[in-house]
């Protein structure tokens, strides 16, 4: 019998029988890569059978493939300046635009940008997509989603600033916003009331938007109706307040074609249905930060602090 070359990690907790159609009884998470400072921004790219992800403090995007394991893919990834700095300066969230180009949330450069190179020949050359709101620089774009129409939604908490604080001297915008970049480049402020906006995604049909808040005092996911250039009817989708003492906060997440939400948060990856019912959780000890679904949505790739995990949920 072939021996599994990867260590397994975590346990699946089941709170609702409907989880069984999403995660089979014998599903296990595997550690497929390790040795990172703070892994983030998982992005599975089916065309190249590769996983991209950020190691934020080291200003690097890595690539993982079954054949070669982890390799450096892009460096610098989020900070192209020449002045030495610390903190979380690299790229964070990663996504593909509707033309298949890599788009990066760049902490250190404080912008959304597109890599000006093909996916199979990456170069640290970037085209800015959004750098400021009404002349004031963003703090550190964190995570993003693009609609089928090509509008870019993103969150802008202060984690990429040196002190990660609302009082950081480099912070130019008083709030931590959720923004939309229209196709003509215009930047629209959608929400300024979430204290630490983080993960973001659209539900199928793109009429509803979900935003995670990684504020330890308000560990919530918020759901909004998308109404043209504004969000309405905001309410709490799920409150993680009963999960104190576990590592992690509401962070990056993905939504599958059925509207199920795979959300990193306290104690691991939460699996919700489209109505915000918690069906189960992949519980792991260290903080999870983001995830990415395979093309068939049967496998979930998870950034888990120093690790990257592959969770084969069903065959």
Image (spheres, helix red, strand yellow):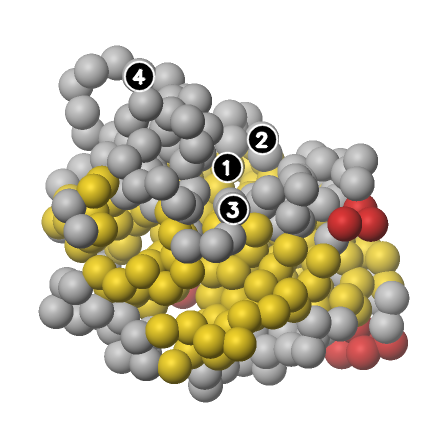
CA gap, disc 2 to disc 1? 6 Å
Residue carrying label 4 = 85
The image shows residue 270 at horizontal and vertical percentages of 71, 58
What secondary structure is found at the residue carrying circle 4?
loop
Q: CA distance from mark 3 to mark 2?
A: 26 Å
Q: Quadrant of residue 141?
A: top left
Q: Position of residue 273 (x, y in %)?
A: 69, 75
Specify the quadrant of the image occupied by residue 303.
Answer: top right
Give the labeled residue for mark 1.
39
Q: Circle 2 sits on which residue?
A: 306
Q: Name the foreground residue: 96 vs 242.
A: 242
Asked which secondary structure carries label 3, the reply is loop
At label 1, counting other C-alpha atoms closer than 10 Å, the crowd grade (few under 14, some 14-19, many 20 or more) is: many
Instruction: Tell me: 271 left or right of 196.
Output: right
Report crowding for label 3: few under 14, some 14 to 19, many 20 or more residues within 10 A (C-alpha). some
Q: Quadrant of the C terminus?
A: bottom right
Which residue is located at x 42 percent, y 78 percent? Answer: 226
Residue 288 visible in the current orientation: no
Gap between marks 3 and 1, in whole Å? 23 Å
Q: To which quarter of the image does residue 54 belong?
A: top left
Query: Which residue is label 3 attached to?
Result: 195
- How far across and down, in percent of the image, does residue 173 sit? 31, 41
Q: Left or right? Give the position of 233 relative to 24.
A: left
């Amino acid at each position: 019998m072939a021996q599994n070359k990867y260590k397994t990690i975590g346990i699946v907790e089941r709170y609702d029988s409907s989880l069984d159609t999403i995660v089979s009884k014998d599903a296990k998470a595997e550690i497929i890569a390790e040795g990172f400072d703070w892994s983030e921004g998982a992005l599975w790219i089916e065309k190249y059978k590769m996983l991209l992800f950020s190691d934020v403090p080291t200003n690097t995007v890595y690539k993982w493939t079954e054949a070669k394991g982890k390799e450096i893919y892009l460096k610098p990834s989020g900070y192209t300046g020449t002045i030495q700095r610390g903190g979380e300066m690299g790229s964070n969230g990663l996504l593909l635009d509707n033309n298949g180009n890599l788009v990066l949330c760049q902490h250190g450069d404080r912008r959304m940008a597109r890599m000006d190179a093909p996916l199979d020949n990456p170069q640290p050359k970037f085209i800015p997509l959004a750098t400021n709101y009404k002349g004031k620089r963003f703090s550190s774009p964190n995570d993003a989603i693009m609609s089928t129409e090509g509008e870019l939604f993103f969150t802008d908490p202060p984690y990429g600033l040196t002190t990660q604080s609302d009082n950081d001297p480099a912070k130019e915008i008083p709030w931590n916003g959720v923004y939309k970049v229209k196709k003509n480049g215009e930047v629209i402020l959608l929400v300024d009331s979430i204290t630490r906006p983080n993960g973001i995604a659209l539900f199928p049909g793109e009429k509803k938007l979900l935003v995670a808040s990684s504020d330890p005092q308000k560990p919530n996911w918020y759901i909004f109706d998308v109404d043209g250039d504004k969000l309405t009817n905001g309410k709490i989708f799920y409150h993680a307040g009963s999960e104190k003492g576990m590592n992690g906060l509401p962070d990056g997440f993905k939504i599958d074609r059925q509207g199920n939400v795979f959300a990193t948060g306290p104690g691991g990856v939460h699996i919700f249905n489209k109505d915000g019912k918690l069906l189960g959780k992949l519980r792991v000890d260290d903080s999870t930060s983001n995830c990415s679904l395979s093309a068939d949505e049967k496998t979930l790739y998870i950034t888990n602090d120093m690790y990257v995990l592959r969770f084969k949920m069903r065959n």
